[in-house]
Image (spheres, rainbow, N blue to C red):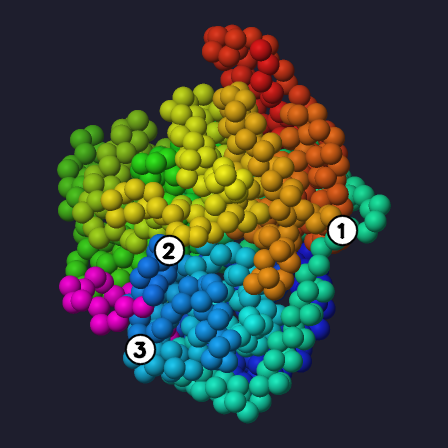
């Protein structure tokens, strides 16, 4: 069914062909020949671009680049320097880790805001907008190659108003201009580079540009020179091109219900979503493409929900097999950090072996829920252990003492052996000699004189020459290194060395502990200590749901702490507004920028979902009451009275040129998908029929999308299924802390019941 997605999206893009021609005139025809068929995206450590080219598959939060420049790019970033910086720009006053990374560029950077807009208008200069995030590998590359270049810095500062945006702080800005870049170039990703008129209308856009011309690809200096010339000599054509594409995007991104329209039939939509996922499923290692492979928890949660209402059918059995096999293979793979827990961003190969080593908070949150759900469905303890491991990593490495959660860990770090250039995965990989030196003890009872290292290396696929294939390592960063991946079951490893399974488990656990200790002495990757409301909401759900299933009071207490953090630091009670982000200060205190960024739709939606999960896990009614309050505020700020559904950002913000409704469940579920479920749950908790009706109106607004390409919205399909099968209310009467009440709650939480809710009852 992927072909269906491509055909539909290609027809949308046909409207913007005039803008493509103007882009070609400015950047040169070579720029557009890179992606003649659509959205060709390249990923770290991949020698061939993915074959799937749908512009509707919005860019994942990883850096995506043209294959024409992929192999030639440098890797990593520079290490810390004791030399005082030569330049300091106004980004030094910001709190975003990404903006602070650019505070000493020889570029006159502005943050997104009125000062930059006024300067562009007063000086009648085009705006250069650069968007990225702090753990983006290719953003580091473009900074080092171009933004630290004195000559390019002068050209940018003298001829443009340069604005730097953290896409995680301002997803509203990112989404608008990413839509433009995808429409005009056929691809997208970060770093994103867009040129705007002083009134913020885009006219040229792209992703990464090398600093100087490279083969047939123009470098940033050439692009800047051409744009300057066109701005002086052909400005009307640039501006009219931007206007046309913007109008086309407004029409092409409209999501609305016709008057009186009802949601589509849930069973047909769910069946089609399953069929489309089954068509793209990769049977050997799981996942939904050959390579690169993303975790896509939204797909896995849909498949388990689909099974729950189709248990007696072959399709239901197949759906469950697809989900569980994918989760097993991911847990065994190199995408899973076997030493320090947590999951990396994605796998660059089909077997989940060599990852892009970045770790994102939203992945940990969604995967913890997926794994604990798999444990409910299958009864396999291993799935619950993986869920616990994920939360152990988050508690240790991504948690602030205030109760909030940090955003991400970088892929790049300085090698333990020394050197000033960062390398991807340096913190995580191992040479065979390191393993042998660390685990030299001979294991008694083994055939021969096998050491702990021998057993560990056999089990985790460690090879003397390294276990990363050259095609997965185009820059040679992982040469001689090993990414740990489980190659054999514990039983087979035990049989291979003639020892008991218990002994092997003991040896492997001991080895992992020793290796974790060694890791603590290595240079750590950059930590993005920005705390985002939306991602904290996702993590709140994870702790609440895993804690409830396992009956783990410590996890539930951590969930309550997270809820209190959100209420204290990311809720402006006076203005009745969620705040998008807060930051860790130099003294480990929580800081806020002035003025703070108001929350977006996903901030409200994910927090509300987390609060409902926390309420069901603890039966503390204050969390339900706050969820009701936030839902009322969300309705006021973002609801579309004419077409139904929620806008992603405040539609009254004149600086955001497109009023978008996110129509894809990607790396994170779309806020509208989760809102449909939130509204349904709240209607059952509170008895408010208007919220039930609003949920139905929302689903009706997305009817066309749900009917034609439900694979794009698996989380929304789950919400549609909940409407169809109706939510079952489970009432447990008794004292909250009484043993029999606790026992009944444990019984309810031990099984996967996707269409249920448990209200508090005295």
| Residue that mark 1 sits on | 642
Q: Is residue 107 above or below residue 469?
A: below
Residue segment shown in magenta: 72-89
Instruction: Give neighbour class at mark 2: few <14, some 14-19, many 20+ (Cα, 10 Å).
Output: many
Cα separation between marks 1 and 2: 36 Å
Q: SS at mark 3? A: loop
**Residue 481 at what x, y percent from top left?**
27, 57
Q: Earlier in the sequence, mark 1 or mark 2?
A: 2
Residue 317 visible somewhere in the drawing: no
Q: Which is the main secondary structure of the residues drawn in magenta?
A: loop
Q: Earlier in the sequence, mark 3 or mark 2?
A: 2
Cα separation between marks 3 and 1: 49 Å
Circles 3 and 2: CB atoms closer than 8 Å = no
Cα separation between marks 3 and 2: 22 Å
**Residue at 32% across / 29% down in the picture?**
501
- The N terminus lies in quadrant: bottom right
Residue toward you, 344 or 49: 344
| Residue that mark 3 sits on | 149
Q: SS at mark 2? A: loop
In which quarter of the view is residue 517 placed? Answer: top left
**Residue 615 at what x, y percent from top left?**
53, 25
Using the image, tell me which numbered label, if any, was put on residue 96: 2
Magenta run includes residue 87: yes
**Residue 560 at what x, y percent from top left?**
43, 28
């Amino acid at each position: 069914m992927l072909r269906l997605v491509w055909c539909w999206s290609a027809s949308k893009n046909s409207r913007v062909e005039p803008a493509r021609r103007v882009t070609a005139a400015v950047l040169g025809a070579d720029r557009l020949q890179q992606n003649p068929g659509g959205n060709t995206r390249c990923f770290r450590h991949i020698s061939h671009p993915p074959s799937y080219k749908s512009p509707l598959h919005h860019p994942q939060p990883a850096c995506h680049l043209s294959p024409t420049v992929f192999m030639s790019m440098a890797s990593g970033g520079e290490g810390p320097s004791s030399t005082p910086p030569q330049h300091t720009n106004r980004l030094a006053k910001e709190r975003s880790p990404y903006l602070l990374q650019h505070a000493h560029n020889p570029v006159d950077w502005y943050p997104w805001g009125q000062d930059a807009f006024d300067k562009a208008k007063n000086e009648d200069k085009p705006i250069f907008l650069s968007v990225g995030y702090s753990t983006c590998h290719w953003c580091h590359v473009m900074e080092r190659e171009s933004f630290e270049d004195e000559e390019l810095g002068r050209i940018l500062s003298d001829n443009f108003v340069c604005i730097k945006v953290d896409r995680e702080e301002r997803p509203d800005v990112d989404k608008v201009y990413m839509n433009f870049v995808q429409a005009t170039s056929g691809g997208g990703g970060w770093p994103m580079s867009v040129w705007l008129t002083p009134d913020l209308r885009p006219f040229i856009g792209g992703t990464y540009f090398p600093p100087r011309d490279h083969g047939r690809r123009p470098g940033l200096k050439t692009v800047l020179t051409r744009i300057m010339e066109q701005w002086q000599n052909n400005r009307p054509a640039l501006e009219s091109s931007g206007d046309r594409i913007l109008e086309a995007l407004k029409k092409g991104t409209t999501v609305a219900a016709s008057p009186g329209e009802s949601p589509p039939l849930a069973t047909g939509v769910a069946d089609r979503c399953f069929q489309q996922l089954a068509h793209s499923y990769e049977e050997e290692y799981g996942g939904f493409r050959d390579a690169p492979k993303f975790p896509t928890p939204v797909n896995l949660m849909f498949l388990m929900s689909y099974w729950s209402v189709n248990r007696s059918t072959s399709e239901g059995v197949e759906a469950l097999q697809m989900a569980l096999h994918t989760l097993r293979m991911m847990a065994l793979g190199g995408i899973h950090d076997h030493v320090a827990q947590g999951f990396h961003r994605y796998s660059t190969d089909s077997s989940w072996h060599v990852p892009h080593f970045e770790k994102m908070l939203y992945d940990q949150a969604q995967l913890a829920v997926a794994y604990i759900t798999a444990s409910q469905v299958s009864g396999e303890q291993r799935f619950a252990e993986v869920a616990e491991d994920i939360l152990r990593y988050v508690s240790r490495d991504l948690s602030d003492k205030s109760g909030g959660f940090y955003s991400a860990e970088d892929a790049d770090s300085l090698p333990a052996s020394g050197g000033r250039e960062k390398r991807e995965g340096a913190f995580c990989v191992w040479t065979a000699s390191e393993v042998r030196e660390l685990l030299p003890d001979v294991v008694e009872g083994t055939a021969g004189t096998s050491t702990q290292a021998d057993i560990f290396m056999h089990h985790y696929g460690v090879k003397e020459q390294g276990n990363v294939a050259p095609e997965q390592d185009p820059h040679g960063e992982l040469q001689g290194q090993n990414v740990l991946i489980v190659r054999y079951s514990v039983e087979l490893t035990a049989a291979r060395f003639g020892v008991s399974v218990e002994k092997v488990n003991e040896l492997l656990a001991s080895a992992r502990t020793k290796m974790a200790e060694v890791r603590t002495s290595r240079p750590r990757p950059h930590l993005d200590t920005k705390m985002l409301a939306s991602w904290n909401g996702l993590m709140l759900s994870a702790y609440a749901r895993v804690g409830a299933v396992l009956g783990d009071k410590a996890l539930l207490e951590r969930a309550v702490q997270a809820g209190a953090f959100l209420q204290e630091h990311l809720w402006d009670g006076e203005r009745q507004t969620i705040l998008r982000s807060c930051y860790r200060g130099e003294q480990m205190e929580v800081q806020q920028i002035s003025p703070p960024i108001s929350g977006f739709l996903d901030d409200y939606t994910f927090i509300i979902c987390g609060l409902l999960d926390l309420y069901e896990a603890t039966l503390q009614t204050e969390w339900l009451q706050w969820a009701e309050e936030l839902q009322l505020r969300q309705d006021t700020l973002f609801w579309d009275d004419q077409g139904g559904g929620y806008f992603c950002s405040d539609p009254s913000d004149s600086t955001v040129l497109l009023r978008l409704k996110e129509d894809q469940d990607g790396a994170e579920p779309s806020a509208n998908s989760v809102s449909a479920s939130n509204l349904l749950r709240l209607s059952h908790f509170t008895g408010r029929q208007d919220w039930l009706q609003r949920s139905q109106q929302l689903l009706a607004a997305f009817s066309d999308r749900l009917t034609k390409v439900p694979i794009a919205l698996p989380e929304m399909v789950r919400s549609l299924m909940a409407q169809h099968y109706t939510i079952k209310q489970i009432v447990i009467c008794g004292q909250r802390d009484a043993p029999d009440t606790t026992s009944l709650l444990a019984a309810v939480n031990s099984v996967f019941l996707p269409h249920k809710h448990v209200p508090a009852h005295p």
